[in-house]
Image: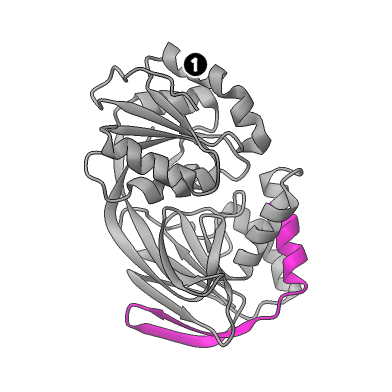
Amino acid sequence: MPPEDGTASDASGTTAFLVNPASDGGATGKRWLEIARRAADLGLTGDAFLSERPEHLAELAHDAAAGGARLIVAVGGDGTVNEVVNGIAGIDGVELAIVHRGTGGDFVRTFDIPRSVDGALAVARGSTTRQIDVGRATYRTWAGPEASRWFANIASAGMSGAVAKRVNETGKALGGRASYAWSTVAVFVRWKNVQLTVTVDEAERSGPMYDVIVANGRFLAGGMKITPEAEPDDGLFDVLLIGDVTKRDLMLTLPKIYRGTHLPHPKAELLRGANVSIEAPIPLPVELDGEQPGTTPATFEIVPRALRLRVP
């Protein structure tokens, strides 16, 4: 697709927009020219590249950075951010800005990046940045071989991977929060907890668990504040082990999760560390920023300050 030519007028140098036209139920593609005009009105212009297939944005982002782009503006949802991060993480001199166009919006919540187009464009046009950590996950692909992938927000192994898969397959007609909440309940009633072994740095835990959350950010699943004290630039994951909870536990705790007041909980444990491994007797789905690339066994490594993010 033809790019929209131009360069940003701020000190960041060349700007590239990485656009997922399928995000927000396809509305992003329909509104892209309008969004581009609003960006230009703020003095933010640059080449625009629209994805045509899954994983395409990672390639486009890497090529844009290699071609000299110093500011990458991701236009899409959490999956878009994940793909773009996989194209630019660790590349010196490149900054990321986000114009959220999706239903989850979990990554931007941690940083108070506006969800409105004009507000997000103003942040992108600004000069305030935060150098944050990213995670590197190694897992088994669905086809069997081992693979690695970056994630910016939250990874998990267990039930939450199945929840994200159900939401992605059934759609988000109810909106992000309601769709994830309904899928959480629907998956939970059928899910059987598994005897997991989790190692966080030198600490090891074994026992029946529904989920292991490996968090760099604070939110997942359309606004659940699952790890309310996570700091995305402290060099550590917040690792939440969710044990043998009951249906009653879930129903009583779910409203608290949205407020971030669910911890401490007698059937959960929070650990912090830079390296995490998860082993299970059966393959469990691994989730990275809402995507499901494979299964356990899995390891997660924090990579400190590997991404520069424009923030309010």
- The total number of labels drawn is 1
Is 192 or 47 nearer to us in this picture? 47
Residue 310 visible to an observer of this rendering? no
**Badge 1: few (under 14), some or many (20 or more) residues near its Cα, within 10 Å?**
some
Residue 44 on image: x %, y %: 38, 19
The residue sitting at 48% across, 57% down in the picture is 228
Which residue position is annotated with label 1?
Answer: 38
| Rendered position, 118 above or below 144 | above
Question: From this viewpoint, which residue is outermost toward the top?
Answer: 41
Residue 150 on image: x %, y %: 40, 57
The residue sitting at 39% across, 24% down in the picture is 47
Residue 280 on image: x %, y %: 54, 84
Quarter assignment of residue 299: bottom left
**In the displayed structure, does residue 108 sit left or right of residue 209?**
left
| Rendered position, 288 above or below 37 | below
In the rendered structure, which segment of residues is drawn in magenta? 180-207
- Does residue 192 belong to the magenta stretch? yes
Q: Amino acid at mark 1?
A: Arg
| Rendered position, 55 above or below 309 | below
Residue 183 visible to an observer of this rendering? yes
Q: Secondary structure at mark 1?
A: helix
Residue 276 on image: x %, y %: 39, 74
- Does residue 43 belong to the magenta stretch? no
Question: From this viewpoint, which residue is outermost toward the front?
Answer: 1
The quarter of the picture where the C terminus appears is: top left
**In the displayed structure, does residue 14 sit left or right of residue 114?**
left
| Rendered position, 131 above or below 133 | above
Is 255 or 64 nearer to us in this picture? 64
The residue sitting at 26% across, 46% down in the picture is 91
